[in-house]
Image: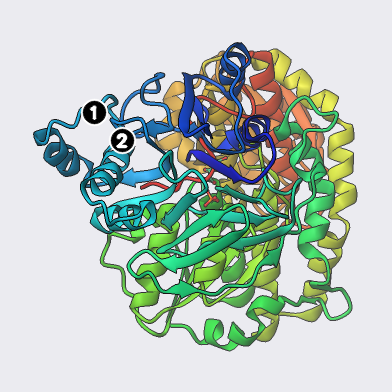
């Protein structure tokens, strides 16, 4: 939700900030803006639409400066037009601010300031903050920009990652974090600030993650971190970021999503590296090793997440219950945080998140922690809030995911869930031989993925035959029901085709009414114990002239004859099949969206990393 970047140093800040915005654009892309400090003045340009549209304007009106801030927006308050775009300037034009998050008491602040005849120009909550900083700064001769910024933040209720500059103190950039992430990049006589490390990595690997409730003052040669509610300096060492430039560039692929789908043959191996024990048929997850006894002894295990990560959680439940016989409840984080769930010191909460910054998931963790539960994070982004706030965790190691629709992070989450389930199961006496069958299948998954990628033509053909329809249905049973949900979500997100996922047998209880010759129905049909049941469901669709698309790991004559399209994944373990089948569904959604001319990496209304409720 919104990407923010700031720079202070000796370089020409404008191209650096614009390039940084492009790297952050996946976080929000409805409008963008930039402000630089030159000759004691703030120069700002803002534009609705993509960063490329802002770039055109900046080319027409050149601006220069070595201190600046820039923002790419995902609108919350006020429509995405030029005026509501960030940076927001105070009424004197001497202070500029960019903000990611929501200022909950913005109406009260605005009312008080408007009563003092301070004019507002935008509909945003963020403008209230810059006007408040300004009022405090210009009202009190004794107060520095830093003092006014701190005082204003203390009056604010809500979530923010915020960066501000002031023309009166042109050698300073201020930033603060409450609920929305901020990373400081440390260079030689220069500093960078951004929502994540992606725009920083080409300049420095040396970073500091700002903690919740902290602010920082940057000058070209110095940084000082303090709590927002106290001016006492906090000392903090820097850490090295592991990300590489190749990981955040598209390379030869048309879209990040396609690149990330293809990367899965490596990312899955990265997820499992050093964690599979083929000999003993088990797995080793160092991050939770000390906490395994607590998980095994827990009264209650919840897995919480949002969106695609929630689908991985549903698969995790089936696996943990199957291998370890521990009952698991899966909860949407947005529901869990507000309901009176049973949580006590014998509860374990596992939170699944690609970004590690999802507001609802973080809130669910904090609630469980407050009530004494053990919290475990399954995260992709190293150093993210969820990774830092949970008691223990397992990184998914899928690498940076830039495409807004999650692909490689999802399969990595499922791989972690599978390893976790087996590891717990083996401790509870699950058979070593059966464990070996699973670890062996996991070990070979990169070959299976390559085979699927090599047969992309067949998937594209299905997309060609179906891309004009308005609806899709996805059906699966057991562990493949969440796979159906995920397939449907992927399609909705990027192609805007309406799609729903159901347990296959549920079709008869309602959705069957939708089936006619224009309705493609995707069946997730592995050759497992549900196979004959799935075949009956396919017959029912066929009888109503629906278009049957089957995904299987073992083609039979019957399935072939009933299916209008049959897509095969290599024969594999039934608990590895959800991963390979999901990759087919990702490619299907991708090709359908491309054929419909949709924006693949930045679908409308979406943003990666949902840091607001
Ligand atoms: C869908 C997608 C979202 C996220 C959800 C949770 O493709 O990416 O549904 O899965 O917003 O995000 P994380 O996993 O970052 O907590």
Residue occupying the point 58% across, 72% down: 236
Q: What percent of the width, then of the height, locates residue 590?
A: 68, 27
Q: Residue furthest left?
A: 115
Residue occupying the point 60% across, 71% down: 393
Label 2 Cα crowd, 10 Å radius (few <14 / some 14-19 / many 20+): many
Label 1 Cα crowd, 10 Å radius (few <14 / some 14-19 / many 20+): some
Q: Nearer the viewer, residue 582 or 321?
A: 582
Name the residue tied to disc 1: 120
Q: Is residue 152 visible?
A: yes
Where disc 2 sits, the SS reads helix
In the figure, is residue 32 to the left or right of 221? left
Q: What percent of the width, then of the height, locates residue 256?
A: 72, 33
Residue occupying the point 86% across, 62% down: 443
In the figure, is residue 155 to the left or right of 85? left
Q: Say if 463 sits above or below 395 in the image.
A: above
Where disc 1 sits, the SS reads loop
Residue 127 image label: 2
Q: Nearer the viewer, residue 524 or 585?
A: 585
Q: Nearer the viewer, residue 326 or 311?
A: 311
In the figure, is residue 383 to the left or right of 87? right
Q: Is mark 1 within 8 Å of ligand 1?
A: no
Earlier-in-chain disc, 1 versus 2: 1
Q: Is residue 318 visible?
A: no
Q: CB of mark 1 within 8 Å of CB of mark 2?
A: yes
């Amino acid at each position: 939700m919104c990407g923010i970047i700031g720079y202070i140093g000796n370089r020409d800040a404008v191209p650096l900030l614009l390039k940084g915005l492009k790297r952050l654009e996946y976080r929000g892309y409805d409008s963008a803006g930039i402000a630089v400090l030159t000759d004691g003045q703030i120069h700002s340009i803002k534009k609705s639409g993509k960063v490329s549209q802002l770039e055109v304007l900046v080319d027409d009106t050149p601006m220069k400066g070595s201190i600046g801030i820039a923002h790419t927006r995902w609108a919350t308050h006020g429509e995405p037009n030029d005026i509501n775009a960030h940076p927001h300037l105070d009424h004197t034009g001497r202070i500029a601010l960019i903000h990611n998050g929501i200022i909950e008491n913005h109406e009260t602040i605005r009312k008080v300031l408007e009563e003092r005849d301070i004019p507002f120009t935008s509909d945003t909550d963020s403008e209230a903050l810059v006007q408040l900083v300004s009022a405090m700064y210009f009202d009190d001769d004794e107060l520095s920009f830093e003092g006014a910024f701190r005082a204003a933040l203390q009056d604010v209720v809500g979530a923010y990652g915020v960066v501000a500059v002031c023309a009166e103190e042109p050698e300073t950039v201020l930033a603060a974090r409450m609920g929305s992430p901020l990373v400081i990049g440390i260079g030689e006589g220069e500093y960078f600030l951004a929502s994540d490390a992606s725009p920083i990595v080409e300049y420095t690997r040396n970073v500091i993650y700002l903690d919740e409730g902290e602010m920082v003052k940057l000058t070209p040669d110095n940084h000082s971190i303090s709590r927002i509610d106290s001016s006492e300096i906090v000392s903090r060492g820097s850490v090295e970021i592991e990300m590489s430039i190749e990981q955040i560039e598209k390379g030869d692929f048309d879209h990040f999503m396609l690149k990330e789908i293809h990367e899965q043959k490596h990312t899955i191996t990265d997820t499992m590296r050093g964690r599979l024990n083929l000999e003993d048929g088990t797995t080793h997850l160092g991050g939770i090793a000390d906490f395994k006894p607590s998980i095994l002894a827990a009264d209650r295990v919840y897995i919480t997440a949002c969106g695609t990560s929630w689908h991985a959680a549903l698969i995790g439940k089936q696996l943990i219950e199957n291998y370890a016989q521990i009952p698991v409840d899966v909860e949407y984080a947005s529901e869990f945080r507000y309901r009176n769930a049973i949580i006590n010191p014998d509860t374990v909460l596992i939170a699944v998140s690609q970004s590690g910054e999802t507001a609802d998931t973080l809130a669910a963790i904090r609630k469980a922690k407050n009530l004494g539960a053990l919290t475990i994070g399954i995260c992709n982004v190293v150093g993210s809030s969820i990774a830092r706030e949970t008691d223990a965790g397992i990184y998914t190691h899928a690498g940076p995911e830039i495409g807004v629709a999650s692909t490689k992070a999802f399969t990595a989450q499922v791989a972690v869930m599978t390893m976790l389930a087996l590891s717990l199961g083996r401790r509870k006496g699950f058979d070593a031989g059966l464990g070996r069958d699973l670890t062996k299948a996991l070990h070979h998954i990169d070959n299976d993925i390559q085979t699927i990628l090599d047969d992309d033509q067949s998937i594209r053909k299905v997309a060609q035959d179906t891309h004009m329809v308005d609806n899709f249905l996805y059906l699966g049973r057991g562990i493949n029901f969440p796979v159906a949900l995920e397939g449907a979500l992927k399609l909705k997100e990027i192609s805007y085709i309406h799609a729903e996922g159901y347990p296959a047998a549920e079709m008869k209880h309602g959705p069957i009414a939708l089936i006619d010759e224009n309705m493609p129905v995707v069946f997730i049909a592995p050759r497992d114990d549900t196979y004959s049941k799935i075949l009956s469901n396919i017959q029912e669709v066929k009888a109503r002239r629906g278009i049957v698309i089957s995904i299987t790991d073992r083609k039979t004559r019957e399935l072939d004859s009933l299916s209008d399209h049959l897509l095969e994944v290599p024969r594999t373990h039934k608990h590895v099949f959800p991963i390979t089948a999901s990759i087919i569904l990702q490619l299907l959604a991708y090709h359908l969206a491309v054929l419909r001319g949709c924006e693949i990496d930045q679908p409308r209304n979406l943003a990666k990393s949902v840091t607001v409720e």
